[in-house]
Image: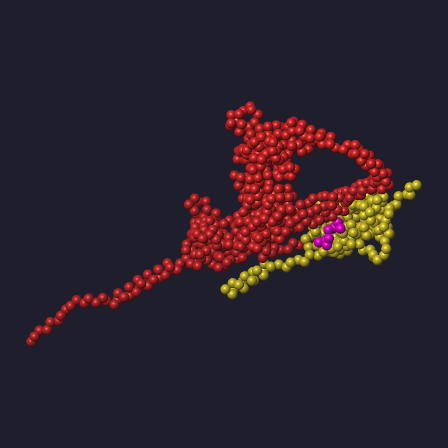
Chain colours: A red, B yellow
Amino acid sequence: MPTEHATVSKSRKISGIWFIPLLALVLGAYVVIHNWMTQGPSIEIAFKTADGLEEGKTKIKYRNVEMGLVNEVRLNDQLNGVIAKVKMEPQSAPLLLKDTGFWVVTARVGLGNITGLDTLLTGAYIELAPGSDKTEARTFVGLDRPPLTPADAPGLRLKMTSNHASSVSAGDTVLYKGYKVGRVETMTFDPKDKLVHYQIFIDDPYHELVNSNVRFWDISGVSVSTGASGFKVQTGSIETILFGGVTFGVPLGVKEGDPVAKNSTFKLYKSYKAVLENPFRFGTYYVVSFTHTVKGLSPGAPVEFRGIKVGNVVRILFKEGQAEQIDAGQEGEGAPIPVLVYVEPGRMELSDTKASLTIVEETIRLGVGNGLRASMERGNLLTGAQYINIDYYPAAEEADLGTFMQYTTIPTIETGLAQLEEKVTSILDTINALPLADTVATLNQNLVSLQSILDNQSTQELPAHLDQTVQELRAVIGSLSPNSDAAQTLDSSLLSLNRTLANLESLTGTLSRQPSAVIFPSSPEVDPIPEVTAQ
Amino acid sequence: MKVASLLLVVLLSGCASQAVEPSYYLLRSNQDLPSSQLNPSVDFALGTIQIAPYLNQLGLVIEIADSQIRPAVNHLWAEPIYDGVRTLLTTDISHANGQELMPAKHSKNATVVNIRIDKLDGTLDGKAKIVAYWWLVRNGEVVDLHRFSKSRSLSADGYRAMVDAETALLEELAENIAASMVAPPFES
């Protein structure tokens, strides 16, 4: 019987059981990749304090839509601030630009407004304001307070400088003819140039009102002045009376200018009166030097061209002149005294632009070659006040423009005794040429006419009219005395204003102590009642 | 969620309070003033009326203790007290003398009446008080000087009665002032 042998062979088939871990691996990889592909960016925001920030609770919002969640709050490496790590939603990626702003929204009570009341119930959150920069960023510095104007708001952002802080500050209103058209965004003081710098924003479409010739001036508070026509009270809106503000416009007699670029710088004047005193923006400095006395020449003295004021004296650079002389090794040689003057093209009927400045500079440069010289003249014989006169002297010796410090110098000419003699001779010649005999005859006739005028009854009544006018003037002055009705009415009005301010102070005081008083009113105050039965 | 909203509404309504509507009062003469042509006074004119600064309040002033006052928050004058006092005194003095008292600036040679109110308030025990001075000025010299000091019980509890009592005191002051206004003897 044949023996059958079973053939044993090794099976090479992979067991089906391995399909399960393989599937798990694929699914796991899919979940990880999907999660990685769909998760939003992580960002870090630096704040000064963690006030209002809670890990896992504080949300990031943009237009009230949740954009992320704070998942970690820690101190920074210098231990002088905090870093909030935020997991953002994927759709927030285009909003995370270099100048994107973040700030913590909590209930704030200010002099002008109350914001963030809803956070009393919902808790603080971080607000996002997208920037306009094209560069993406993942680390940000949080703002202390909300920006007054969003970065992408339509309008015009400008800069202003002022010598003193006055009463204008960040948050104040910018008005045009009393209508609110913008706001002061920031206020900083630069110790280098010793100027207060403001950043303001004019909303669209009012930014079209701003041109190169507008001036900005402070209209904070109430301005009271008295004059022949009585009391004059000038104010802006109630907001500017209480919190300060700025207005702008083209000064009287100045033409409308050209449109201005964003971030253009303007000077902030103290008042409209200050604007009228210095209505022009562009001017240039020159130095004129004199070897004779400058007594009677003071800062503010006019600089004239043939009797037309074209600028004014800024300062006498005596110290600088001496220093230059010492530097040049010319001590004891009687150096001329340099005088710094400021010339404005606007005063010469030219447009108040940089281009006009170039025209003036070129005119002076060419004029010096044709005898244009500066001289010092006596403006007032009684006070001895002097001014600078610029004119052409064709016979003057040749001279060129020079430099002193960083300024261009205009050559000067001395109007000394020789010129005086020439003028006196000229005057005497003119007098000689006068028809004196005819003049005396005419004068006699005029005297007769004058006598008849003096004899006239209406002329003789003039002193009586004058006396009556003086009496009426006294009555007017009397009506302005402290006991007058006008003064008492003004007193009463000021008391009403005081009472309004006192009420306002009480309100802001209550709100400062208890911000929630707006929605949780405190118990009304009850007046004590006078009672007859208490006698 | 609904329960939480309901709870919030209940809590908020619990915090809400009823606003108190303020009452406004006017100082005016109780004299009957029919329409008629009036005679301006030639001998006398009204000069200044000074009111003690503490009375320049929106609210009626009540004395809650000696030298301690409190302006009411919900009982207010309808106009500055200066205007109310001036109107009332002018009306009553003119009525008492039968001639209209004109402002001093309209009457050059008249004797000028100047008035000062130092006190005009109420007390918690139901009284109204007034202290006032008036003086007559003729040709730049003070020719007569008086003081009027009086208190008056209120007819009922409350600020309405206090205003009535203060009006009555001012009317009495006007009568006294009118009585003191005697025309100077004719100068030959």
**Where does the magenta region start and end?**
B76-83
* Side of A411 where A453 appears, left or right: right
Q: Residue at x 44, y 56 (%)?
A: A94
- Position in image of residue A163 (x %, y %): 58, 41
- Position in image of residue A168 (x %, y %): 59, 46
Residue A247 or A237: which is nearer the viewer? A247
Q: How many numbered marks have been drawn onto this rendered protein structure?
A: 0
Q: Residue at x 62, y 29 (%)?
A: A414
Residue A279 appears in the figure:
no
Asked whether B80 falls inside the magenta stretch, the response is yes
Q: In this view, does A238 lie above or below A422?
A: below
- Position in image of residue B13 (x %, y %): 58, 61
**Toward which corner of the image does residue A402 lie, by quadrant?**
top right
* Side of A200 where A97 appears, left or right: left
Farthest residue in the left direction?
Answer: A1
**Toward which corner of the image does residue A438 lie, by quadrant?**
top right
